Image (tube, helix red, strand yellow):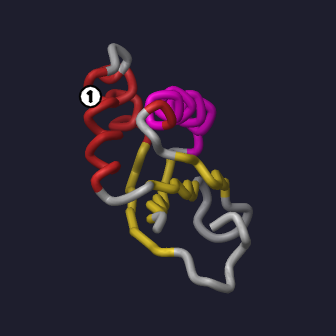
Amino acid sequence: MSRYLIATIEVRLAGMARFIETVAMMKEVLTAAGWSLKGAYNLRSGLAGTVINVWELADLEQLDVGFAALARDPRWPQIQAALAELVIRETVAFADALPYGPSDN
């Protein structure tokens, strides 16, 4: 059964382009570690600068595998510095798919 990590991230508006570039780097590493990005959204209503990323993981152990891969990547200091500067707040939730959802769950 797949697990989903749903990250709701408040980003400084002036840094949105740099945030997108930074998460693209993270996506390379996390995808190689087995994560699958199922959705990436910039909200058009609600709190300005809010991004929602939905990642599919095979299981919760894959969370640690992904974070370990990030820590080993030579770009990690650059990624970490950008996130520290650009992210105001991040909320992470874990979810399971329901049987009435899309057939690709």
Percent from the top left, x then y, of residue 59? 37, 59
Bounds of the magenta span?
13-30
Q: What residue is rendered at 46% in x and 41% in y? A: 34
Q: What residue is rendered at 46% in x and 68% in y? A: 1
In the image, residue 34 sits, relative to residue 52, either above or below, namely above
Q: Badge 1 local density, few (<14 within 10 Å), some, or many (20+)?
A: some
Determine which quarter of the picture holds residue 13: top right
Determine which quarter of the picture holds residue 3: bottom left
Q: What residue is rendered at 32% in x and 30% in y? A: 69
Residue extending farthest to the bottom is 100
Which quarter of the rendered picture does the C terminus lie within? bottom right
Please give the residue where the numbered disc 1 appears in the rendered image: 71
Percent from the top left, x then y, of residue 88? 40, 51
Percent from the top left, x then y, of residue 18? 56, 29
Amino acid type, residue under disc 1 in the picture: Ala
In the image, residue 104 sits, relative to residue 72, either above or below, namely below
In the image, residue 79 sits, relative to residue 102, either above or below, namely above
Q: What residue is rendered at 48% in x and 64% in y? A: 2
Position of residue 91 in the picture relative to residue 22 (left or right): left
Name the element at disc 1.
helix
Position of residue 26 in the picture relative to residue 103 (left or right): left
Whether residue 23 is in magenta: the answer is yes
Percent from the top left, x then y, of residue 67? 30, 39
Position of residue 74 in the picture relative to residue 34 (left or right): left
Judging depth in this view, the residue of 100 and 44 nearest the camera is 100
